[in-house]
Amino acid sequence: MWPMPITKSLLKADQPVERSSSMHRQLSSALGQQACYAAGLFGMKVISFFLLPYLASTLGTAEFARMETLLALVNGATVVVGFGLVNSLYREAGLADSNQQAQIAATITGSALSIAGSVLLLALVASPWSLPWLNQYWPISTLEYWLLMVLISTEGILAVPLAWLRMQNRAGRFLQVMLTRTLLYALLAWGLLSQNWGLLGVLSAACIAVSYQVLHLLWLQYHDSGIRFKAKPLWMQMRYGLPFIISGLAMYASQGLDIVLLSQQIDAESLAAYSIAIKFFLMAALLSQPFQLWWYPRRIQLLKQVDGQQQAAEGAVKGALLALVLGVMVVAVAPVAIRLFFAESFWVAEQYLPWLVCAGILKQWGALFNLGCFTTDKSEIQMSIELSTGLLCFLLLPFAIGYYQITGALAVLLVSQALRLSAYIIISQRLLALNYAVKRLLYLSPVALLSMFFPLYFAQAFPNLAQELTVLLLWAALWSGVTVLSLWCLFVRHT
């Protein structure tokens, strides 16, 4: 939690300097913690992103598309296996005193290990039926099946000790563990692919890297709190976690389910190109994360300050402008990267990217203009909106993809995020009316839309000229300059 603002009434008359210094140290520590988390997340994504062209070129279009489908299935299964244990840890340990927190963490870690072991046992018992059923839809070898089961079960274990590190403010250790796993995976994947292991090599590298991370985290957890196995708390935690499974699946329906459904409707080349477009879309969201990591803990506390509502409104608009500008920059730069690092069969990804980025911008705006929803104790408001968004995607995606394939998937994602944003704005403003200065946003949005979709029109009107790398570089350089200027105006000029 961020420290409260220092006021004269909070300072003792006989120790003003000491208290002030203490608050400054707390603030510095909080900033350092946030920087470590941001570096860990950003470093992981950047390493994985730069590995992507090598994976795509070495695996080939068909195997790359199959890899993305299998990873999407793993992500969906991980939501279930996690059983909301992280939320149980936050709730139970957060309400307990310092002496009991370690015991609670030990018990929940034991529950995570028990669930992971049960998943592997169930996979063993059910393999004679589950593997043939999976092969009706996605080709999976027996060894690949077991590697996927290891990934699913271990990902369920990881969340608890990682959450414990965050609760203990051990951001440095968090950064070390996350980056080491990512680097180990990248090196192993590169080495095994160079030995022609194919997708089996990628999955093996992922399993070895995640096994290292599990062992490292469990060793840290054992020395911090121990690990305890108890049946009664396990059942209670699983029951408590059911709503979080539903929420997680709802989020998965709006980001992940499309890949699984498209894999049954379109060819491997189109699916691989769509997957590449999603990677660039996620990069656009990642670029905004440093601001979000800084802003989200701060915005609630601003409401307690003089003129805090106005500051909170201005910060939300700044974040929305930032998401918009960075999204346009990614759309402008992506064609250059795609042509330089990916085979021609992936170039069609440029046509999908503007639509995906628009959906991503709307999603970020929903997370920025929802402040009123967090000023009430009724947390079911946010859950209802997220569940409704996921349910809408879950119901519409099969039909939209069945009839319109990728176009249908993009339409559903855009509509669902637009409705989510509208719901957050309407409900949030009713709970806490904030005076958002949206003029700049309204003026810039049409320009941004035109800039994102103009290259698609230009490519149809002048197909030969649009393929020239020089033209693409000039367009990317133009919007990179606009982005730098916008960042300076948003965060430097007015500070």
Image (spheres, grey):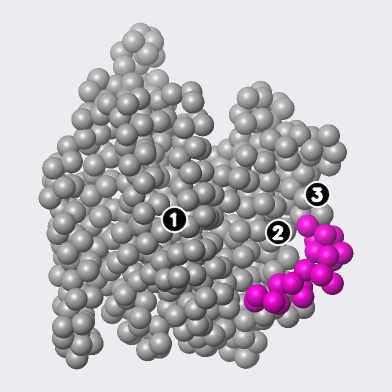
258 vs 117: above or below: below
Q: Which residue is mark 1?
A: 39
**Amino acid on which disc 1 is placed:** Ala
Where on the picture, by quarter, is residue 125? bottom right
Q: Secondary structure at mark 1?
A: helix
> Looking at the picture, how far across and down is residue 42, in whole percent?
43, 59
> Looking at the picture, how far across and down is residue 395, in whole percent?
52, 55
Mark yes or no: residue 229 visible.
yes
Q: Which mark, by number, is residue 114?
A: 3
- Relative to residue 485, is residue 17 drawn left or right? right
> Going 19% across and 60% down the picture, which residue do you hit?
448
Gap in angstroms between the C-alphas marked 2 and 3: 11 Å
Q: Which residue is mark 2?
A: 154
- Is tag 3's residue or tag 1's residue first in the polypeptide sequence? 1
Q: Which residues are magenta?
A: 119-138
Task: Out of 484 and 28, give the one closest to the viewer.
Answer: 484
261 vs 54: above or below: above
**Amino acid on which disc 3 is placed:** Ser
Badge 3 crowding class, 10 Å Cα cut-off, few under 14, some 14 to 19, many 20 or more, is some
